[in-house]
Amino acid sequence: MSVTAQSRIAEVTASDLPLHCPTPQTPVWSMHPRVFLDVAKAGEMLCPYCGTLYVYKGAPVKGH
């Protein structure tokens, strides 16, 4: 996962799924309740707590 700090956009791949925010790389000071985001199906999702935009850059997920 790559994150652009200024714009709070995170690109995710299939290895990052299932995706939840905050991620394990999130600093402790910016934690909020965990929310799972179905970014693979929608293509991009906005976290309702912190406003980070997650953009899926992987291959389509099969079997769900």
Image (spheres, grey):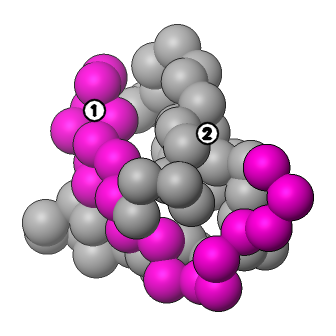
User: Residue 50 at x, y = what percent?
Assistant: 27, 32
Q: Which badge, 1 or 2, is on the more N-terminal residue? A: 2
**Horizontally, is 61 left or right of 13 in the view?**
right
Judging by the rendered image, the residue that carries numbered circle 1 is 50
Q: Which structural element holds mark 1?
A: loop
Alpha-carbon span between mark 1 and mark 2 = 12 Å
Q: Is residue 48 magenta?
A: yes
Dot 1: few (<14), some (14–19), or many (≥20) neighbours within 10 Å?
A: few
User: Which amino acid, mark 1?
Assistant: Cys
Residue 6, image x, y percentages:
14, 68
Q: Main secondary structure of the magenta part?
A: loop
Residue at the image position 42 percent from the left and 53 percent from the top: 42
Disc 2 residue type?
A: His
Percent coordinates x, y for residue 24 in the rendering: 69, 48
Q: Are marks 1 and 2 in contact (CB under 8 Å)?
A: no
Q: Is residue 10 visible?
A: no
Picture residue at 53% right of the left edge, 38% below the top: 37
Tell me if mark 2 has few (under 14), some (14-19) or many (20+) residues whose alpha carbon lies within 10 angstroms of its own. some
Task: Identify whether 59 is placed above or below 34.
Answer: below
6 vs 25, left or right, is: left
Question: Is residue 33 in view from this perspective?
Answer: yes
Q: Which residues are magenta?
A: 44-64
In this picture, residue 6 sits left or right of residue 14: left
State the image coordinates of residue 46 (x, y, percent, origin top left).
28, 42
Q: Residue furthest left?
A: 7
Residue tagged 2: 20
Q: Residue 1's mark?
A: none
Quadrant position of the N terminus in the picture: bottom right
- Nearest the eye: 64 or 51: 64
Question: Above or below — where is 57 with respect to 19?
Answer: below
